[in-house]
């Protein structure tokens, strides 16, 4: 059952970092954080203030796809795959303490584990050492170890110059959404939407197929939504998570991260 907190969530405006992230939970705040830069190959975003809550959005009924894409994207070459047995792909790891949150990120027991306690509403995108991509198929398994219902987590896409897309789920409330951060402002592209495909416990596999201005979204192998947007053309890909308010704490585990992209000229 959806709880009253779902009706109170809101979507913030953040800035100065990078990423696209698939987002779930109808009125969640989605501020923007990044770890303090460290001398690694991984780029790091920058925190900004959480904006004033906006009007509570309406939960959209379960999406019915108008078309099913061909699965030729599964034949695209693998650009990067990571089961997190080590840190070959140079993800951010270590402590990060700043005005937005106290965080510890580690690769533990074959998972990329983020333990974050917020000082204010915060969103944090994280990416491996990877080239910029335009068209791709991106997937990851994400699991909430501990955390409030107002937390969400998912995928960051086309991260570049402080901009990004964000595709996220909130498992406890069976909802997802999709936003874009551009020039310090968040815009909702898919409002919070119910999805029976989301597991309330255990891992969820989330995936995005990006081809030009077209985005197709999958949860646990099922197509759940589609949209068009031309705001961001290319950038890095990764994961992301957010917390709504001060003192919220979550432990989020990511696993089996994989990105495929068409071969040049393909």
Image (cartoon, rainbow, N blue to C red):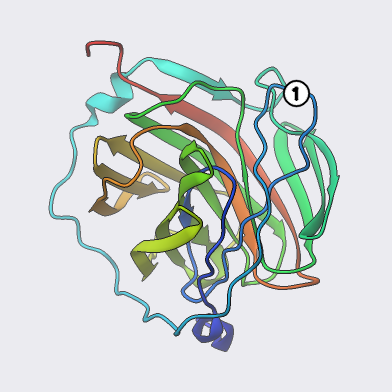
Report whether 146 appears left or right of 237: right
* Residue tagged 1: 40
Q: Where does residue 259 sit, x and y in percent of width and height?
A: 45, 27
**Quarter in which the C terminus is drawn:** top left
Report whether 104 appears left or right of 12: right
For the point 57% across and 42% down, the residue is: 239
Report whether 218 appears left or right of 125: left
Where residue 263 sits, quadrant-wise, is: top left
Where residue 248 sits, quadrant-wise, is: bottom right
Q: How many marks?
A: 1
Q: Nearer the viewer, residue 164 or 48?
A: 48
Above or below, 6 relative to 173: below
SS class, disc 1:
loop
For the point 26% across and 49% down, the residue is: 229
For the point 65% across and 59% down, the residue is: 48
For the point 60% across and 34% down, the residue is: 127
Decide if residue 29 is in sight here.
Answer: yes
The outermost residue toward the bottom is 4
Q: Mark 1: give few (<14), some (14-19) or many (20+) Cα within 10 Å.
A: few
Q: Nearer the viewer, residue 14 or 257?
A: 14
Q: Where does residue 6 sit, x and y in percent of width and height?
A: 52, 81
Q: Where does residue 72 sit, x and y in percent of width and height?
A: 23, 25
Report whether 187 appears left or right of 151: left
Decide if residue 202 is in sight here.
Answer: no
The outermost residue toward the front is 183
Above or below, 7 relative to 239: below
Q: Nearer the viewer, residue 251 or 23?
A: 23
């Amino acid at each position: 059952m959806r709880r009253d907190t779902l009706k109170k969530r809101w979507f913030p405006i953040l800035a100065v970092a990078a990423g696209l992230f698939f987002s779930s939970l109808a009125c969640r705040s989605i501020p923007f954080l990044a770890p303090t830069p460290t001398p690694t190959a991984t780029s790091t975003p920058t925190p900004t203030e959480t904006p004033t809550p906006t009007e509570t959005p309406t939960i959209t009924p379960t999406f019915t796809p108008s078309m099913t894409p061909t699965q030729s994207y599964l034949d695209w070459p693998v650009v990067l795959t990571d089961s997190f047995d080590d840190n070959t792909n140079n993800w951010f790891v270590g402590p990060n303490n700043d005005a937005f949150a106290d965080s510890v990120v580690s690769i533990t027991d074959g998972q990329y584990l983020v333990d974050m306690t917020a000082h204010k509403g915060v969103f944090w995108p994280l990416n491996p050492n990877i080239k910029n991509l335009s068209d791709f198929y991106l997937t990851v398994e994400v699991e909430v170890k501990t955390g409030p219902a107002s937390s969400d987590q998912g995928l960051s896409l086309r991260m570049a110059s402080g901009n990004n897309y964000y595709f996220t789920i909130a498992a406890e409330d069976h909802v997802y959404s999709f936003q874009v951060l551009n020039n310090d402002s968040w815009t909702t592209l898919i409002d919070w939407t119910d999805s029976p495909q989301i597991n309330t416990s255990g891992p969820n596999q989330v995936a995005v197929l990006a081809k030009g201005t077209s985005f197709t979204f999958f949860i646990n192998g099922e197509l759940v939504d589609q949209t068009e947007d031309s705001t961001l053309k290319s950038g890095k890909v990764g994961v992301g998570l957010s917390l709504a308010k001060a003192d919220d704490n979550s432990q989020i585990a990511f696993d089996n991260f994989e990105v495929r992209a068409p071969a040049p000229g393909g």
